[in-house]
Amino acid sequence: MERYDLIIVGGGIGGSALAVVAARAGRSVLVLERTEVFEDQVRGEWISPWGVTEVARVGLLDLLVGAGGHYLECHVTYDETREPAEAEARTLPLSIFAPGVPGPLCIGHPHHCQTLLDEAVRAGARVLRSVDVHSVSVGEAPGAVFTHGGVRMEARARLLVGADGRNSMVREACGITLNADRPHHMFGGLLVEGVEGWDDRKQAIGTEGDFAFLAFPQGDGRVRVYGSYSLEERARFAGPDGARKFLNNFRVNCSPDNSAIADGRPAGPLRSYANNDTWTDTPYAPGALLIGDAAGWNDPIIGLGLSITYRDVRIVSELLAGSDHWSTEMFAPYAEERRERMRRLRFVASITSTLDAEFDEAARARRRSYFDRSANDMSLGAHAFAIMGGPEAAPPETFTPAYRARVLGEEIG
Ligand SMILES: Cc1cc2nc3c(=O)[nH]c(=O)nc-3n(C[C@H](O)[C@H](O)[C@H](O)COP(=O)(O)OP(=O)(O)OC[C@H]3O[C@@H](n4cnc5c(N)ncnc54)[C@H](O)[C@@H]3O)c2cc1C
């Protein structure tokens, strides 16, 4: 039986980043990753400016930039209720949100995971791929039973970390259930290549008709695009011509440059999800701890899962480094910070999805009214500041029904 300081189940972003940081700090680490090769699952490729700060704080920024990380510099919100020129007159520079950070950092998700996992090996972690984890145990004797290369093995650790994503088996073994709110809309994503004529430092979002688009250039003519549409139309882009139909929705009057995207080639699968938030107040149990999506995820419409995961890694690795006597109670500050962080981000995701991903006449009027009012009142952009600058960068009153009502132009009951 092998023994480690940490066994990490899941070698995606959270698992492999924590493995690097812990191994660099001298801990013995075993990473168990199910896949042989990371593939495009339509996952995050955009790290918010506050997430970039977190990446830097765990000592991984040079690695990601060296691996081809691509910074974005400006943002435009297009909309059917205004001319393209009006939208572009309000282009937002993206260097204003986090000190020393030029803007969001984009890097392909499979490449991002592989880069981190390779670094974990260099730092001294033992990394096993194509692993079938049969069971995990928590409590007094944390560990895992798994098959690797046809051999059944067992390992024990001082701490078991669940970095195994949305359907976490570690979370289940801990008996932790997630709270979940109701899905609000469908959200599909696709990587597009051969995009010629799109400024590759410009990200854009926009709503027209029954579709809301988001576009994040990755460099070299590749753009990760997303689209929100109604929950009632779950199967809208199903079938062999789904990706082409999806791209055709990018041909909109409110953003003429989008034709460059629509004319591009699908460079991966189109995947759609019913977007919602999930969370737990206690992402740990005796002998075990959850990070990243395993501990609950934020609605991807605001693209913060990577930033959240990097902050988890930073806080957890600091707690682990702070003591040689690891106890369950030691993780209480992590739970406390994460609870408030996720509450705030859930709140701004809900404002964002109501504003950008509803499609009736009332929603159009709401967006137009918001553009007019926010042009003269910067305080109405506080939720966007929380998304870009971090959940603590906006004042606490941003996360109240009164602020939500002001942004959405609603009466508060
Ligand atoms: C459509 C969509 C778009 C998104 N866009 C963005 C974005 O632009 N920006 C952003 O910040 N976030 C985005 N996110 C969220 C982001 O992708 C996730 O929050 C992030 O990937 C979480 O990282 P993780 O390491 O916790 O989990 P994952 O990335 O899911 O990794 C989990 C790993 O665990 C492995 N695993 C799972 N089960 C087992 C097991 N039993 N045994 C061994 N290994 C296992 C998996 O193979 C995987 O490698 C998006 C999410 C979605 C759904």
Image (tube, rainbow, N blue to C red):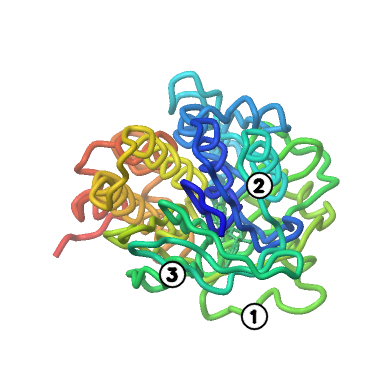
Instruction: Tell me which residue sits at (38%, 58%) in the image.
Output: 288
Task: State whether residue 377 appears in this view.
Answer: no
Q: Which residue is mark 3?
A: 184
Residue farthest toward the front in the current orientation of the protein: 1
Disc sitting over residue 303 in the figure: none
Instruction: Judge: label 2 CB < 8 Å from ligand 1.
Output: yes
Residue 86 appears at what percent x and percent y? 54, 37
Which quarter of the rendering shows the N terminus? bottom right
Looking at the picture, tell me which residue is in the foreground, 396 or 402: 396
Looking at the picture, tell me which residue is in the foreground, 227 or 267: 267
Query: Mark 3 or mark 1, which has the lower sequence index?
Result: 3
User: Element at badge 2?
Assistant: helix
Residue 408 appears at what percent x and percent y? 31, 55
Q: Do callouts 3 and 1 mark residues in contact (Cβ within 8 Å)?
A: no
Residue 43 appears at what percent x and percent y? 62, 56
Residue type indicated by callout 3: His
The alpha-carbon separation of the residues under discs 3 and 1 comes to 16 Å
Q: Which residue is mark 2?
A: 113
Quick check: 58 above or below 225?
above
User: Element at badge 3?
Assistant: loop
| Quadrant housing residue 321 | top left
Instruction: Tell me which residue sits at (55%, 43%) in the image.
Output: 19
Residue 38 appears at what percent x and percent y? 72, 55
Ligand 1 lies in which image quarter? Answer: bottom right
Query: Mark 3 or mark 2, which has the lower sequence index?
Result: 2
Q: Do callouts 3 and 2 mark residues in contact (Cβ within 8 Å)?
A: no
Disc sitting over residue 235 in the figure: 1
User: Element at badge 1?
Assistant: loop
